[in-house]
Amino acid sequence: METPDKKSNGKKILPILLGLVIILAVYFGISKYVYSLHHEDTDDAQVDGDISPVLARVPGYVSEIRFEENQVVKKGDTLVKLDDRDLRIKVEQAKAAVENALAGVSVAKANVATAQANFETAKSSIETAKVRVWKATQDYTRYENLLKEKAIAKQQFDVAKAEKESAEAQLTVVAKQQSAASMQVGAAGQQVEMAASVVAQRKADLDFANLQLSYASILSPANGKASKKNIQPGQLVNAGTPLFAIVSDEALYVMANFKETQMEDMKKDQTVEINVDAFPKQKIEGIVYSISSATGAKFSLLPPDNATGNFVKVVQRVPVKILLKADSDIVSKIRPGMSVKVSVHTN
């Protein structure tokens, strides 16, 4: 049976305990309120990074694979080789086409020289024809005067007249030959230009063939880890076939989705405290790098729109990109896709 002293002590302890609970509750509430004045938290966030999918750019059989799953690679490393024998043949064919086009240019230039020589010959011939016409005209005039004086026979006059008409006809023929030779010179010059354009086209074909050949060696587009290998030796791949992906180890960041009601005091370059779910005892520091120009819902396949009747007013989320400080030891251990909790120091 309890004594009066024990009952009295119990009555004294109960108010003290109740007071302590109230004090702790008030302290907790005040601390949470003060914390909320200077921080914005969310657990709707995950680690993200640059993942570069690597696709085949030319069809072919896989002849060699030079990496293992999740192997660290450097930018420019040759990771996959395709059978390139048919591509090399196309390069040789393109080289032969270039040589043939260059020979065509030489032939066209030779034709220009020939046409120029023919023009010069026609030009000299027309001068000779003009002299002949002049002499025949002089003889015709002289014989015509002598015929009027009956100093010569009409047969001699007819011969002079025929010579004059023959010389004039020859001059007409030579003039047409000169005009034709001039046109041949112009046509030969155009053939040179056409042959030169064919050379340029064939050289472009050769460059394209060499480019296609280079695609048979598939390189790493970035530093990181080669993951998601989808090929085996001897496999036939087509252009556009995904081969593997490079997960960059130099561009990890956090994408956090904050409620629109949390965005009032948030701005670029604010300090962020990050807790990774996989490593709950360690914290990472970061900074706000950028804030999305639209809510995540606006980038969805069916964005909310009153006009279409699919609108329901809910608190929207705004994506915020947060950069990690590289001097943290935990950064090298985290992977894209890991869940995190972030707290932005807004003041």
Image: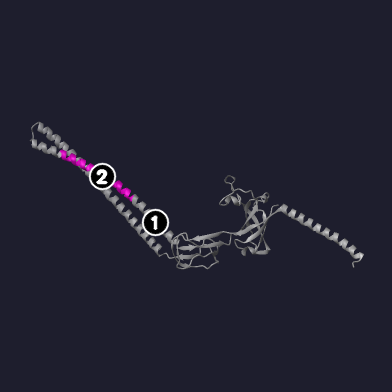
Residue at image coords 16%, 40%: 166
Assess disc 2: are there few (<14), some (14-19) or many (≥20) residues with their C-alpha within 10 Å of its C-alpha.
some
Q: In which quarter of the view is residue 159 placed?
A: top left
The amino acid sitting under disc 2 is Ala
Judging by the rendered image, the residue that carries numbered circle 1 is 205
Q: Secondary structure at mark 2?
A: helix
Q: Position of residue 89 (x, y in %)?
A: 38, 63
Can you tell which quarter of the image residue 18 is in? Answer: bottom right
Q: Label 2 vs label 1: CA separation?
A: 37 Å
Q: Earlier in the sequence, mark 2 or mark 1?
A: 2
Q: Position of residue 94 (x, y in %)?
A: 37, 59
Counting from the top left corner in percent of width and height, residue 264 is at 67, 49
User: In the image, which disc is placed on residue 180?
Assistant: 2
- Can you say which quadrant of the picture contains the N terminus? bottom right
Q: Residues within 10 Å of mark 1 (few under 14, many from 20)?
A: some
Q: Is residue 107 above or below residue 156?
A: below
Furthest toward the right, the residue is 4
With 128 as the anchor, is 345 left or right in this view?
right
The segment highlighted magenta reads 164-192
The answer to which of 231 and 67 lies nearer the viewer is 231
How many numbered tags mark residues here? 2
- Which kind of residue does numbered mark 1 sit on? Asp
Residue at 17% over, 37% down: 137
Is residue 225 inside the magenta stretch? no
Farthest residue to the top: give it. Answer: 149
In the orientation shown, which residue stands out farthest toward the front?
Answer: 1
**Would you say residue 132 is visible in this rendering?**
no
**Which SS type dominates the magenta stretch?**
helix
Depth-wise, is mark 2 or mark 1 nearer the camera? 1
